[in-house]
């Protein structure tokens, strides 16, 4: 099931894995248990490439 929401607390409650779409790009998948609210907030600004070291092509294929 795909859930699209800006309510991070709700997403953390109901999700097993998280993705972020920012600046027209899809982030890598992250296990909810490994994710933090500040990290997801940064990802919402498109900053996952610097943190995770993933290439854009890898993120697009997740």
Image (tube, rainbow, N blue to C red):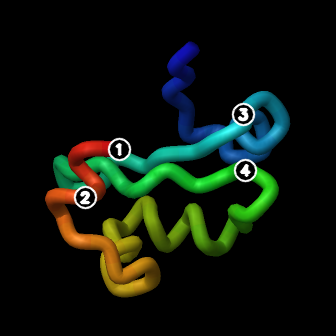
Instruction: Decide which of 5, 19 is in the foreground and name it.
Output: 19
Image x and y of residue 4, in percent: 50, 27
At 80% from the left and 56% from the top, the residue drawn is: 33
Disc tally is 4
How far from the left and from the top, in percent, is residue 36? 72, 67
Binning the other alpha carbons within 10 Å of mark 2 as few (below 14), some (14 to 19) or many (20 upward) gives few
**Label 1 sits on residue:** 62
Contact, mark 2 vs mark 1 (Cβ under 8 Å) = yes
Determine which of the numbered discs, if any, sits on residue 15 in the image: 3
Secondary structure beneath disc 4?
A: helix
Mark 2 = which residue?
58
Question: What residue appears at the point 67 percent right and 52 percent down from the top-left corner?
Answer: 31
Which of the pair 58/19 is nearer the observer? 58
Q: Quadrant of the C terminus?
A: top left
Q: Does 35 sit left or right of 9 as displayed?
A: left
Q: Nearer the viewer, residue 7 or 53?
A: 53
Q: Which residue is mark 4?
A: 32
* Callout 3: SS: loop
Precedes in sequence: disc 2 or disc 3: 3
- The first of marks 3 and 4 along the sequence is 3
Q: Residues within 10 Å of mark 3 (few under 14, many from 20)?
A: some
Q: Quadrant of residue 59?
A: bottom left
Closer to us: mark 2 or mark 3?
Answer: 2
For marks 1 and 4 on the same chain, the one whose residue lies earlier in the sequence? 4
- Please identify, in this view, whether the residue under mark 1 or under mark 4 is nearer the observer: 1
How far is disc 3 from disc 1 in space, using C-alphas?
16 Å
């Amino acid at each position: 099931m795909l859930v699209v929401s800006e309510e991070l607390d709700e997403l953390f409650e109901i999700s097993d894995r998280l993705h972020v779409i920012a600046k027209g790009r899809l982030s890598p998948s992250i296990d909810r248990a490994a994710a933090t609210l500040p990290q997801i907030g940064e990802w919402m600004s498109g900053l996952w490439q610097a943190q995770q070291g993933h290439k854009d092509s890898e993120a697009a294929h997740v």
